[in-house]
Image (cartoon, helix red, strand yellow):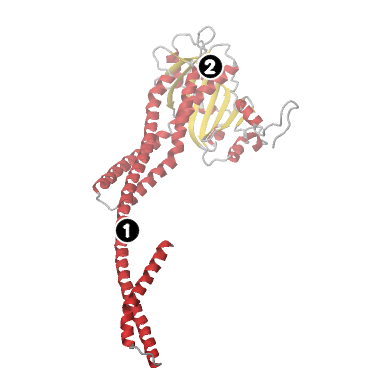
């Protein structure tokens, strides 16, 4: 329903405010350094908003949380000394807990324990509704990023694995404003670890934007890779379908099977391909979308290399690009197979149409022969009919002449009947011809 919202404007569309405010729907958090961000993304298939609401109500001070506040798919809840951000997306829901960095987890510590120090409690975190897709401990510390050996110290904090590192962003002086370091390893506690180093004076807003972009890169990377198992599962089916299609095309060329058998096989093959397309089409589309988002977020990080290490972008391009190429190739392969089945079906339909036309031609020839035979039979019957009609007419003449003879007229009935035969035959034949002419004229 349109509403009048300004005396200077026409009535307002009902969706205007909602669409306009979408740009403010998911603002970045404000993170005061040093901080620990505990981030978990769970798949929400089969998980209702009410279930997520019930779990959020377990947070201290939020027992009265209403469902209306969750309709925008974004919610930030302030608790004692920490905040919890809830974001619901099409396939997953993200929970981000921003809390103070534990005292034992500062710069230079060796693999500090983090999982047990989540602010809402481990039971609350373990009870999140859904299946874990991404889980990250991100430490954000204030460190001089131009100091000596960042990599060795970061590796001690992150744990085993080759450290990937990047300098991020460019300040007005042409310097980086922060560093991101990770090893993309899942630890014994089930979490990945990331370390963001920023110099003194980094604003809370900038720290929030950095954390959001880095966390989104990893989340979208994992969601994009969900298309890879689908591709592997489809590979066997596609190979079998391509082989079957080749056999059917060969049979079509050799005429080795009946058209009905070929048609049944093609229909079954087309149905299996359409089913695969319907089942996995969304996954292929989602993979493309997530891959695009990963690329966009990496561009926004404005990475610069640290000597001796790979940047996050380089690592992901080398690892993610082949997987995405495989998914795209499988999608094209499936579409190509469907198109080839369609072309083969068209060839079979053409052959069936030609065979049908040949059968129709034979049927028409038989009908033509039957009509010719019927015409000849009709001509014969007409000749017999003329003779029969003439016989009855001559008989009438004979009986009429005989009756007149009995009345005393001087002529012979047999002679009169015999003389009338040619005239009767001619008159009957002429009458039949007139009937034919009238029928043809009509």
Query: Circle 1: is it few (<14), some (14-19), or many (20+) Cα within 10 Å?
Result: few
For the image shown, how many numbered marks are present on the structure?
2
Circle 1 is placed at which residue position? Answer: 364
Percent x, y of residue 362: 29, 57
Q: Quadrant of residue 387?
A: bottom left
Query: Circle 2: is it few (<14), some (14-19), or many (20+) Cα within 10 Å?
Result: many
Percent x, y of residue 208: 57, 20
Percent x, y of residue 46: 53, 42
Identify the image quadrant of the C terminus: bottom left
Q: Secondary structure at mark 1?
A: helix
Q: Is residue 201 above or below residue 349?
A: above
Percent x, y of residue 260: 32, 53
Question: What separation in Å lies between label 2 and label 1 (alpha carbons)?
Answer: 91 Å
Please, which residue is most extreme toward the right here?
Answer: 7
Q: Is residue 31 left or right of residue 276?
A: right
Circle 2 is placed at which residue position? Answer: 141
């Amino acid at each position: 329903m349109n509403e009048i919202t300004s005396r200077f404007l026409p009535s307002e569309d009902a969706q205007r405010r909602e669409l306009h405010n979408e740009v403010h729907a998911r603002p970045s958090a404000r993170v005061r350094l040093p901080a620990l961000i505990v981030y978990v993304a769970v798949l929400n298939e089969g998980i209702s908003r009410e279930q997520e609401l019930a779990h959020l109500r377990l947070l201290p001070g939020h027992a009265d949380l209403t469902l209306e506040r969750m309709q925008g798919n974004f919610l930030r809840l302030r608790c004692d000394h920490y905040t919890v951000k809830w974001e619901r997306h099409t396939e997953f829901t993200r929970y981000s807990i921003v809390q103070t960095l534990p005292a034992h987890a500062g710069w230079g510590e060796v693999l500090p324990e983090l999982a047990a120090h989540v602010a809402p409690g481990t039971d609350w975190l373990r009870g999140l509704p859904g299946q874990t897709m991404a889980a990250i401990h991100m430490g954000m510390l204030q460190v001089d990023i131009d100091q000596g050996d960042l990599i060795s110290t970061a590796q001690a904090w992150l744990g085993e694995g080759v450290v990937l590192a990047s300098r991020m962003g460019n300040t007005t002086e042409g310097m980086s404003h922060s560093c991101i370091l990770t090893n993309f390893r899942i630890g014994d506690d089930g979490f990945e670890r990331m370390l963001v180093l920023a110099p003194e004076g980094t604003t809370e807003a900038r720290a929030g934007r950095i954390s959001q972009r880095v966390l989104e890169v990893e989340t979208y990377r994992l969601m994009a890779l969900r298309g890879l198992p689908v591709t592997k599962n489809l590979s066997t089916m596609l190979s079998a379908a391509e082989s079957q299609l080749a056999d059917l095309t060969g049979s079509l060329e050799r005429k080795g099977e009946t058209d009905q058998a070929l048609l049944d096989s093609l229909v079954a093959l087309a149905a299996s391909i359409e089913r695969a397309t319907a089942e996995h089409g969304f996954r292929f589309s989602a993979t493309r979308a997530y891959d695009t988002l990963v690329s966009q977020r990496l561009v926004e990080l404005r990475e610069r290399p640290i000597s001796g290490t790979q940047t996050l972008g380089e690592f992901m391009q080398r690892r993610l690009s082949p997987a995405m190429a495989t998914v795209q190739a499988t999608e094209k392969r499936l579409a190509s197979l469907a198109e080839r089945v369609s072309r083969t079906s068209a060839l079979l339909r053409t052959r069936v149409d030609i065979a049908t036309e040949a059968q129709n031609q034979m049927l028409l020839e038989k009908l033509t022969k039957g009509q010719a035979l019927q015409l000849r039979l009709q001509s014969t019957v007409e000749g017999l009919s003329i003779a029969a009609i003439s016989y009855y007419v001559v008989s009438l003449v004979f009986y009429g002449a005989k009756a007149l003879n009995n009345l005393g007229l001087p002529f012979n009935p047999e002679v009169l009947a015999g003389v009338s035969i040619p005239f009767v035959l001619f008159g009957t034949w002429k009458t039949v011809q007139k009937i034919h002419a009238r029928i043809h004229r009509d």
